[in-house]
Amino acid sequence: MTSGEGGALIAFEGLGYRYAAVSLGRSPAVAVVQSPAGKAGEAPRGGDAASQATLRFPDFTLPAGGHLLLRGASGSGKSTLLALMAGLLTPSQGRLTLGGVDVGALAPAARDAWRGERLGFVPQRLHLSPSLSVRDNLSLPYVAAGLKPDRARMDALLDELGVGALQDRRPHALSQGQAQRVALARALLRSPRFLLADEPTANLDDEACAATLALLRRAADDHGACLVIASHDARIDAAWADWPALSRLRLS
Amino acid sequence: MSRAPLNLPRLAWRYLWARPMLTALNLLLLSLGLAAIGFVVLVGEQLEQGLKRDLGGIDLVVGAKGSPMQILLAGVFHLDQSTGNIPLATVAQLRAQPLVAQAVPISLGDSFQGFRIVGTTAEYLALYQLAVAQGQVWKGPMQAVLGAEVAARSGLKPGDRFHGTHGLASGGDEHEQAYEVIGVLAPTGGVVDRLVLTDLASVWEAHEAHGHHAVHDDEASLEVSMVLVRYRSPLAAVMLPRWVNAQPGLQASVPALETARLLSMVGVGVDVLRGFGGVLLLAAALSVLVALLHAVRERQGDLAMLRMLGATPARVAGLIATEALMLAGIATVCALGLAHALTAGLGAVLAQQQSVRISGAWLSGWEAIVPAMALGLALIAAAWPAWRGYRLDVTELLQTPR
């Protein structure tokens, strides 16, 4: 089922991303991060050169059937790596392939289409639209791609995740757990090959954290998706110590 | 409400009404501005058309010395008093001119229930191409042909009798001698609908009985109010007014010139109204712009999520533009309805005053300017917000807030 790169599901080769620091006013920490190898990634401070910094990522290959846990403190480049994987940013050097597709080499429109079809994404702050009902929120992946919403698929997924009765509610009328399930349903709707989650357990108590991790793991298994989680939460390591398919990549 | 599957237009619609107060306010501003423009179009065009129709084929109006504008208003549009009387012999003098194709005398001064009685000859019917719907044309004095509206309002029909009133306002002295209704004209939509036509001699007889004229048979003492003239050749436009003005006691009024003056006077009011509409529209456009910018900022997360879900930047920009277009579409419908209602209202007021006829049912090709302006404004107001949506930084969605 996997093609190219010798069956690798995800591969980074000499991957790097060059920031213009000005465009990153909100997260200056990222601009001065060091590469894992400890060389060259450091941005000189002051003067013109300070306006740019290159973030380098270690070479890495995830075999078919694997899942990925991206670890690292905040500002270590987890979010940037997720953005590169989603095709929202283009690598300034090296290559990044997902399922055999060189994401950075795709044309912008093709990249958007690929992202909609192949990638499911659960953002940390869920980003359910407050103006829309659960049903309409769930229709957004179809609207984004210009497709007709598949009502049967939406119903089935919500039922499967135990929130089928909440379709007419607005997001503010949902509990955190319910909202997360709806966001997960939205990510799984178009049967993505990759399921990306950004800090899914942040701000959750231990019980909710365990439930969320179980939910994500089961969703990835049931839907045959490769789970990619970016988190600095140490509880995940402990919870998934027994999951052989999970690879860990630490960014520093 | 959410039975139909969501698509881009429906999503835009939901977003539009997610802030109902703001949307309603913008709708009101847009509609009022567009309605003012539409109203100006509707009224202006009907005024112009009405003037043209009432002018018929008249090239020149000859009256007693006085204001040419007053002569035109009194003799053609029947909105003012005549400037005085001129000798009946003037008609023969004019007819003797080789440049004159037709010269039709009219006598004004009496009215019936506020409708003006016009003494004239049968040529008047030919000049205005009038058709008799019931009865026939007058054969002698004291026989009257009613305009369609006069007949409808008064309920008179051929065979009935009525008394004329001295003066143009209702409530003046009634003349003793009664008119006999002999015919009713087909409706024209013009001023003739509100006139009572009768033989020139009727007016003399009515006034003789009233004691205005001492000597009845003296041809030389007979007078008319005005003469409507049609030219035989364009050359007359140069020669005839000059000749008329050279005659003692006569004044030429050239409808083409006077109407242009009239319209330029009315035009000031029209310009004010148009300018007012323009200011409203500008305010509306700014308000829509601010609302859309605010919406883009407020829904940054939603829009970024759409991009994350696979929407192209163009699709996100299109969503914002669709909102503006929907607003413009609704405003267009409201504005056209409002413009017609206002025109109908003005028409009703003017009809009460027996003045210019204006209808709310009038349709003009120029009304297309309303949707065109709405579309233009929507696109202008949406351009910047849509560009912001197009350039949205989706990676911020991924920057975990601390």
Image: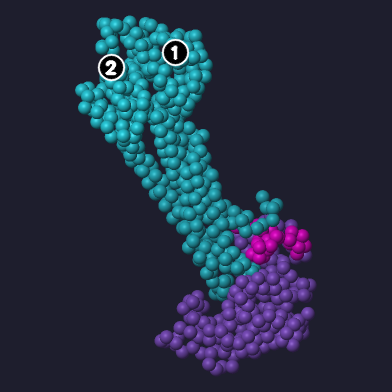
Chain colours: A purple, B cyan
Residue B96 spot, x, y in % from top left: 30, 22
Q: Are marks 1 and 2 in contact (CB under 8 Å)?
A: no
Q: Chain ID for label 1? A: B
Residue position marked by numbered label 1 in the rendering: B138
Marks 1/2: CA–CA distance: 23 Å
B297 displayed left or right of A153: left
Q: Is residue A167 left or right of residue B134?
A: right
Q: Is residue B379 left or right of residue B249?
A: right
Q: Which tag, 1 or 2, sits closer to the chain's start?
A: 2
Which residue position is annotated with label 2? B89
User: Where does the N terminus of chain A fall, quadrant-wise?
Assistant: bottom right
Q: Residue B238, image x and y in percent?
A: 28, 34
Q: Secondary structure at mark 2?
A: helix
* Residues shaded magenta: A131-157
Looking at the picture, tell me which residue is in the foreground, B399 or B30.
B30
Query: Which one is in front, B179 or A226?
Result: B179
Q: Quadrant of residue B105?
A: top left
